[in-house]
Structure formats: structure tokens, C-alpha cells
Amino acid sequence: MSVDVDDVTPYLTPNGDFYRVDTALQIPDVPAESWQLRVHGMVDQELTLSFAELLERRLIERRITLTCVSNQVGGELVGNATWIGAPLRELLAEVGVDPAADAVLSTSADDMTIGTPLEALTDDRGAMLAVAMNGEPLPLEHGFPVRMMVPGLYGFVSATKWVVDLEVTRFADISAYWTERDWSEKAPIKTASRVDVPRSFQTLPADEVRIGGVAWSQTRGVDKVEVRIDNGDWNKVELAAVDNVNTWRQWSWKWQDATPGTHEVTVRATDATGYTQTSDRAEPRPDGSTGWHSVQFTVE
């Protein structure tokens, strides 16, 4: 699941390097022994779980790439990790969800609120209450003891850290932190790609122009990645093996017969639905940036 190009982002992001976007000035300290999760709202039967009771439930392991909606084109607010947690689909089935509900309002220990489409928590994508990250207990800064992980949705509508409350409800009846600030209610992650190598303004020898990076399209999967030099023809690149549709794929391409001078490499990805990234540039607000990532470099 990896390509042989130096300095391409590793397939699994180490916990210490995984991006963070915090709204609180201080990270909540939530002891596992006192943590509780309340599930209520438009349900047949409310449920309260302790951390020990959560760990007694069936746990699943999934590799999932998480992306922040604030990520600019070519940005680094994206990471891939192995997560272990309890399936939210099973938990919500247990409490009995009202058919009229269409959202879950989650609340963190520091009172952060996030609204998530109910459908994304009850379909087969593997949404979970995560308790472990890359083989270790969930780090404090990434939501210990429990956070939500929902493949295919930007973090601001899905990835509640230090989660302590789940209210089954309707979007029409709730207001969440980011939607109050004019971000979208429903925010599926957009197909995107990035050049990691070469770095901007790097100088490379003509016989060693190796280009590489990552591309992602959660719940759909990356089908093809192409690069072009300057404004030339598009070239298909080598893609690392598929792990699952919810993880990024590394890619690489060698520029044969590279010519001396300053050049620009541009990348674009096509997902499994046949959609190819648009060249139109859009800022992250309200539902994620768009555009092709380009890097300038020099061949000597």
C-alpha cells in the first residue's frame, strides 16, 4: 500500500504527526473511569454507557483517512490511521431510532457540539466510537477516552473528540458550533490530491525527477491519478495498492527525459464514480476547498 518514493507522506500517519484543530484553549482531561456516554432524544429507549461497558461491546478495526474542511488545496490537514472502536450502527439500532430523525447532535466534554447526518452513522461505512489509534489508546489530544470517527465526512460534522452525549434529533431542530458560523450542515469529503515530492522550489538532477504524493476520496475510492508538467499532456501515475475506499492512496511518477529549467507539476485525481477533480479554485468555507495542486521546481 506504499510507493517507493522518498519523502512521500507515509501511508499511516504517526499519532504525534496527526493534524489537530482544537476550539478549546485547554484540552479536556476526562478520566476513563468516570467517562459516560448518554444516548437519548428521538429513540425508543435511552442508554448510558461507561467506558468499561463500551469496551465490552463488539469492537471493529478500520483504517480511515480523516480530513479537515479547513484544508486548503495541497494542505496538510489530513491524516490516515488505524482506528479501533464500537460500531455506532449497532448502538443506534439498540436504542431504536425514530424514523423521523435525520441527525445526531454530539457533544464533547468541553461542550463542543457537532451535527452529523444520521444516515452516515447507520449505513455500512463503519462509523464508530473510537478508543484506539494506531495500536495505542486514543491520545488525549485526539479525544481520549472516546471520539467519533465517521468515514467520508469532514471532521467538523463527524469527528467529535471527548464525546459524552449523543442526541438523536432532526437538523431542523438543532444548531451546532460550526453551522452557527456559516459552515455546511452536511459535508462529504471531496475528492482531492496533493504533490508531496518535489517540494516547492526544490532542485533535482535531470536523471532523478521522481514525483509523488497522496490522493483521497473517502467512501468512493481513488481510481486514477494524473500529473502534467507545465501545461503539457496528462500522464497516468503508478498508484499504491488499494486498502479500502476510506483511505488515501500514495502515487508516484518518474519524468523521463526531464529538461533543465524551472517547471510546474500539477496533479488531479479521479474517483471510482468517474468524477475528476475540478480545476476551479474554491476556498474551504462552507463545505471544503477545490482545485488542482501544483508545485514549482527546478531541474538542473
Image: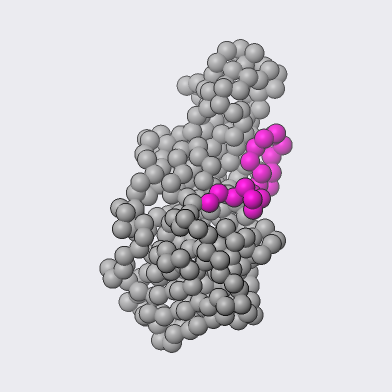
Verify whether residue 18 appears in magenta: yes
Left or right of 237? Residue 101 is left
Provide residue 31's location: percent of width, then percent of height. Answer: 59, 72
Can residue 165 be seen by looking at this rendering?
yes
Q: Residue at x 68, y 47 (%)?
A: 1
Residue 243 can be seen in this image:
no
- Hey, which quadrant is residue 35 in on the image? bottom right
> Residue sitting at 45 percent across and 40 percent down?
72
Would residue 117 appear left or right of 64 to someone viewing this image? left
Instruction: Where is residue 107? Give x, y as percent.
Output: 43, 69
Q: Which residue does the image show at 53% across and 78% down from the upper left?
A: 36
Residue 186 percent location from the top left of the image: 37, 58
Q: Is residue 175 magenta?
A: no
Q: How is the image coloured?
A: one colour
- Residue most extreme to the left: 172
Question: Dividing the image into 4 quarters, which one contains the C terminus?
Answer: top right
Of helix, strand and loop, which mostly describes the magenta segment? loop
Q: Which residues are magenta?
A: 1-20
Q: Outermost residue toward the front?
A: 26
